[in-house]
Image: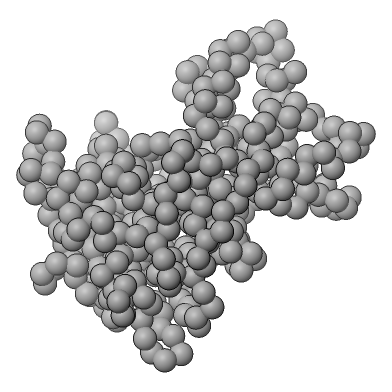
Amino acid sequence: MSCASESIEPARRKSVFLPLVVLLLTSACGSDEASNPGGDQPFAFGAADEASLMTTVRSLTARGMNGRRTGTDGAQQAATLIVAALGNCPGVEPVTGQSFRIEASSDSLPAAWSTPVVNIAARWPGSGELADEVILVSAHYDHLGPTADGTSYYPGAVDNAGGVAALLSLACSVPTGSGGDAPRRSIVFTFFDAEEAGLIGSKAWVGDPPFPLDAISTQLNLDGYGAPLFEHMGDGLVFGPDLSADLAEEISSVNESHGAYRMMPVGHEVLEGRSDQAPFQQVGIVAVHLATGIPPGVYHTPADTADGLDPAVLSAATDWTGMLALRMALRVTRPALIDPPRAPYATVETYDAIIGNLENYPEDLLGPTPTPEDQEALASALFVARAILDSWLDKVPETDEEWESFTETMAVVAAPFAALLL
C-alpha cells in the first residue's frame, strides 16, 4: 500500500469533505509484510445461489421464528432448520459425537445464566499433515426476539440471518481439487447462539472447546451480512487484518482475485468486543469480523427484514468469504499475529478524538447537538469513510470518471459531517 495523498491535486479535488480526507489520512502509511500465500491449487467453491440464500433468510426471519431469541421456540426452530440443512450437505460431519448441536456446559456459562445455549458446528475434514488444524468460519443465528409490547418482533435479517445463509451455502458446497483431495486444513462451520446476550455462545466455546483451541489457525466471523454498505458502494468491511500481516496479505489477494466485490480493511479496535470473533482474539487466535453493511435506521429494529437485503451483495460476499476460507485452509504455514497491530487502520484513539469533536458540535451551523447515540453513529460513519479512503490508497483516482465516482461515494458519508472539521 502506498501513501499517495500527495498526488491529489488541490483545485478540482477540494470537495466539501476535504477536511475529513485530511483527518482520515493521518497515519495511513504502513509497511506490508510478506506472507506464505495459499497457493494456486485448483480448489474452489461453487458460486452461491441468490435464490437459495434468500430462501434461508426469509425462513429465519419469518413471523413464526419471532426474532430467534436464545432459549425461545423461535431459536429452537432456527437451530432445527440449520441442523436439517447440514444433514443434507455432502461431505460435512459433526465436530463431536453424532450431533451437529453442541450444548454449552454450565461451567462455560455465566454464573447467573440459566437459559440453554446451543451452538451448532459441522466440519469438512482436511487432508494430510495439517488436517488437525482448523479454519473456523462462524455466524450467530440468534437475535432479539419479540418487541417489549409483544405487537411485533425483530426479524434480524442483516443481523444475522444473512450470515447464517452464507455459512450454510458454503458448508453445502464442498470444494475439491483436481485430484479429489480436500484442502490441507479442516474447515469448521460454527453457528453461535446467544451473541446478542453478550457473546455467550462464543465465550462458552472458548471456555469449553469441543477440540483444542490451538488447533484453530484462523477464524472468520460473519455478522451483518447481506445489505450493501452504501447505496453507491457495494464493498464490505473486514475488521481486524491489522492483527496479522499474513491474513492481510490473503485478504488483499482475494480482493484482487474476486474483482467484482471487495472487503475493505479496518482496524480490529473499531468494533472491538462487538461480535463473536472477540473471544477468540482474546486468547491469541487470528480472527476477523466480516460485514457487508447494515442499512441506515434498521440496526436492532423491527425494520431489519429480508427485503432490506440485496441478493447480489449477499451472494458476492458469500463467494468472497469462501475464497478467503480456502486460501487460509491451503496455506503452508499458519498466519502469525503481530504485536502491536500494524498501521494503516483506524484506531480506537481516532474514534475517541472524533467523539470529542462531536461533543463540540457547532449548533449555530448544524442545529441541535446530536444525542450520545447519534454521536456514536456519526463517529462510526467517519470510520467507514476512513476505510474507504484506505482502500483507495492502492489506486488514487486519476481520470475525471474515477474521481467523480470516488467523490460520489465519499459524499454519501462525509458531506453531512464536513462542517464538524472546518
Question: Residue 4, how many percent across, how many down?
Answer: 77, 44
Point 39% across, 51% down: residue = 287
In the rendered view, would you say 362 is above or below 247?
above
Q: How is the image coloured?
A: one colour
Point 29% across, 35% down: residue = 147
In the rendered view, would you say 330 is above or below 73?
below
Q: Is residue 415 visible?
A: no
Q: Is residue 231 left or right of residue 102?
A: right
Point 47% across, 18% down: residue = 372
**Residue with the most extreme top position:** 364
Q: Nearer the viewer, residue 181 or 367?
A: 181
Q: Is residue 287 left or right of residue 47?
A: left
Question: Residue 374, how many percent across, how many down?
Answer: 51, 23
In the rendered view, would you say 148 is above or below 79?
above
Q: Is residue 274 visible?
A: yes
Question: Residue 127, how many percent across, how many down?
Answer: 31, 80
In the rendered view, would you say 170 is above or below 207?
below
Point 46% across, 76% down: residue = 45
Splitting the image into 4 quarters, where does residue 259 fall?
bottom right
Q: Quadrant of the C terminus?
A: top right
